[in-house]
Image (tube, rainbow, N blue to C red):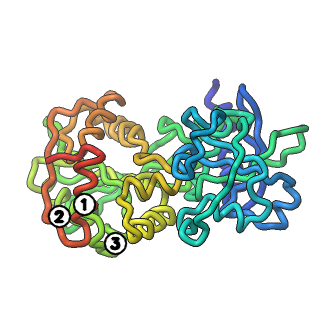
Amino acid sequence: MSEDARGEGARRAARAIDALRRGWPFRVTSPDGALDLLAVESARDAALAEFGSTDVLLSGERAVTLKLTNQRVAATPGPVRLAGAADTVAAALAIADPALDLANPLKGPFQTIATGGESAAATAMTMARHAGLLPAFFVRDASGDDAETACDVADAAALLDPARLEIAARARLPVEASETAEIIAFRSPEEASDHVALIVGKRDGNPPVVRLHSECLTGDVLGSLKCDCGPQLHAALHAMADAPWGVLLYLRQEGRGIGLVNKLRAYALQDQGYDTVDANLRLGFPVEARDFAIAGRMLDLLHIPRIRLMTNNPEKVARLEKEGVEVAERLPLALPTNKYNERYLATKRDRTGHQL
């Protein structure tokens, strides 16, 4: 596929995500079927009446929570389609939003049926997560060629392809840890989120200390005590200042890739007693939804093939090495805990493999 064709495909996918957020129907096509979709979270009853289907499409993770996978059609991993499950937006939200589980404890019985397009359904879930919405849709089999907004699975892949990332701007930025730091912004043509690198110290022939830091508004800006993101960010910058040089990659992937609103929903579930892993799963998301290929692309554009990675997460090492980055050393980052984040940090250690 030519670069022009990829660009046009990415623009189609971006228009579909815009429709998703606005509560408009859109179509996703794939070799194994095509689906017309209306996002449950952004839909209105008038739009649902015009859409004309009461089938609901849920993520595989949410289907497990609702104990749907004991039905044969839903037994394989992936999105699940419920026949005639909800005739109003409120009824669909009661199925899709775990915050409403306690208020609606008796759900179903539901009949699961074939999705009508496995690849299209999986792509729709990725698009919902990218839009920061719950992974749930009203769904119907596509018919005719009258869809106002449509994309295919290749279009969505083109939109999310880190190879489309380029350096957009750079400037000197004195910061507390280093008055000679340089900030570099990265942008994809069709994407709204800009990623950032901060270079601390003077570049030399040695591999830099690198920290991959996913955006955390609550921790980085508001000083949340529920996580250790803010302290990790500032400790990493000071460690870079003490080294010959270092690079902070600030990735716009809030909430491990599920978005700010969904992260706050996960926080509310944690207040009900779920840990961070189970909260994400109940929302219908994977435990880890971040794309570390973005970091690999940023390092490539900065001409940095070899690094010393500051992380407690061995998975980051493996994911970067998969992108062709040589990790010469993993540097742990140990910080004090507090009464609000002790369980969170224990969950990262015990369930997602973090280690010092």
Q: Real-space Cα distance between discs 1 and 2?
A: 11 Å
Q: Which residue is mark 3?
A: 221
Q: Quadrant of residue 106?
A: bottom right
Examine the rendered structure and indicate whether residue 284 appears above or below residue 79.
below
> Mark 1 or mark 3, which is nearer the start of the sequence?
3
Front-most of residues 167 and 251: 251
Q: Is residue 20 above or below residue 294?
A: below
Q: Is residue 59 left or right of residue 229?
A: right
Q: Does residue 102 appear left or right of residue 213 in this picture? A: right
* Residue located at (15% from left, 53% from top): 333
Report the front residue among 340 and 154. 340
Q: Residue at x 35, y 59 (%)?
A: 275
Instruction: Residue type at mark 1: give it.
Output: Leu
Residue 97, percent from left and from top:
58, 62
Which residue reaches farthest bottom? 222
**Does the CB distance between marks 1 and 2 fall below 8 Å?**
no
Horizontal relation, residue 30 to residue 314: left or right: right
Mark 2: give few (<14), some (14-19) or many (20+) Cα within 10 Å.
some
Q: Are marks 2 and 3 in contact (CB under 8 Å)?
A: no
- Identify the residue under disc 1: 233
> Looking at the image, is 219 positioned above or below residue 349?
below
The residue at 64%/64% (across/down) is: 94
Q: What kind of element bears circle 2?
A: loop
Q: Residues within 10 Å of mark 3 (few under 14, many from 20)?
A: few
Residue 177: numbered disc:
2
Q: Is residue 336 left or right of residue 5?
A: left
User: In the image, which is nearer the foreground, mark 2 or mark 3?
Assistant: 3
Q: Assign the N terminus to one quadrant of the image.
A: top right
The answer to whether 3 is drawn above or below residue 141 in the figure is above
Marks 1 and 2, the one that precedes in the sequence: 2
Mark 1 surroundings: few (<14), some (14-19) or many (≥20) residues within 10 A? many
Which mark lies nearer to you, 1 or 2? Answer: 1
